[in-house]
Image (cartoon, helix red, strand yellow):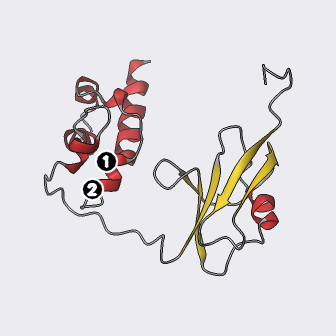
């Protein structure tokens, strides 16, 4: 915007996934509803069940196609029913995969336990605010613990208590 002296009015959005008829990269005006963008790609397939703004690891699940494209919308990922099946969370088996894969050097197992125990004061000491919410920990977790969700909740609670 600064280089060309023009405001950001549109951006390239990747529409992909097994649940969309014709995946494509499109120039999309900001504010355009996801429904219009998906229709431009041939619409949703019959077995489409989950729409994600962004990618599979850091993207945010959307519950409606009435969401507008914003400057941070890099992609729209549409998953089918078979791809979107969520496994039931199981108890942590202390495998430490989340620790090994955390780019910030955090210990997600401890942070998750502190969030579940609502020990908000201890979370900051263990570095919850340093979490970049990349999703690596949740991706490698064999117990399917929603670690990113727990980190976001913990960060929110810590920030609320600092006010």
Image quadrant holding the C terminus, namely: top left
Residue 141, label in figure: 2
In the rendered image, residue 156, in percent from the top left (x then y), is placed at: 42, 33
User: Would you say residue 153 is visible in this rendering?
Assistant: yes
Question: Which residue is at the far bottom?
Answer: 46
Task: Give the Cα separation between the discs numbered 2 and 1.
Answer: 6 Å
Q: Which residue is drawn at 30% across and 60% down?
A: 144
26 sits left or right of 144 in the view:
right
Q: Is mark 1 on a helix, strand or loop?
A: helix
In the rendered image, residue 92, in percent from the top left (x then y), is placed at: 18, 56
In the rendered image, residue 154, in percent from the top left (x then y), is placed at: 35, 36
Q: Nearer the viewer, residue 127 or 153?
A: 127
Q: In this view, does 155 lie above or below 148?
A: above
Q: Which residue is drawn at 67% across and 77% down?
A: 45
Q: Do the residues labelled 2 and 1 touch (CB within 8 Å)?
A: yes
148 sits left or right of 83 in the view:
left
In the rendered image, residue 41, in percent from the top left (x then y), is placed at: 77, 66
């Amino acid at each position: 915007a600064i280089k060309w002296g023009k405001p950001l009015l549109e951006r390239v959005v990747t529409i992909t996934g097994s649940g969309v008829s014709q995946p494509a990269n499109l120039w999309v005006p900001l504010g355009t509803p996801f429904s219009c963008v998906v229709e431009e790609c041939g619409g949703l397939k019959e077995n489409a069940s989950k729409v994600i703004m962004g990618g599979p690891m850091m993207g945010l699940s959307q519950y409606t196609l009435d969401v507008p494209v914003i400057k941070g919308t890099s992609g729209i990922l549409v998953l089918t029913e078979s791809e979107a099946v969520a496994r039931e969370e199981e108890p942590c088996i202390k495998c430490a995969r989340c620790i090994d894969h955390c780019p910030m050097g955090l210990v997600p197992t401890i942070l998750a336990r502190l969030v579940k125990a609502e020990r908000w004061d201890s979370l900051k000491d263990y570095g919850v605010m340093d979490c970049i919410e990349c999703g690596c920990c949740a991706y490698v977790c064999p117990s399917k613990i929603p670690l990113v969700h727990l980190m976001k909740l913990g960060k929110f609670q810590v920030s609320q208590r600092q006010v």
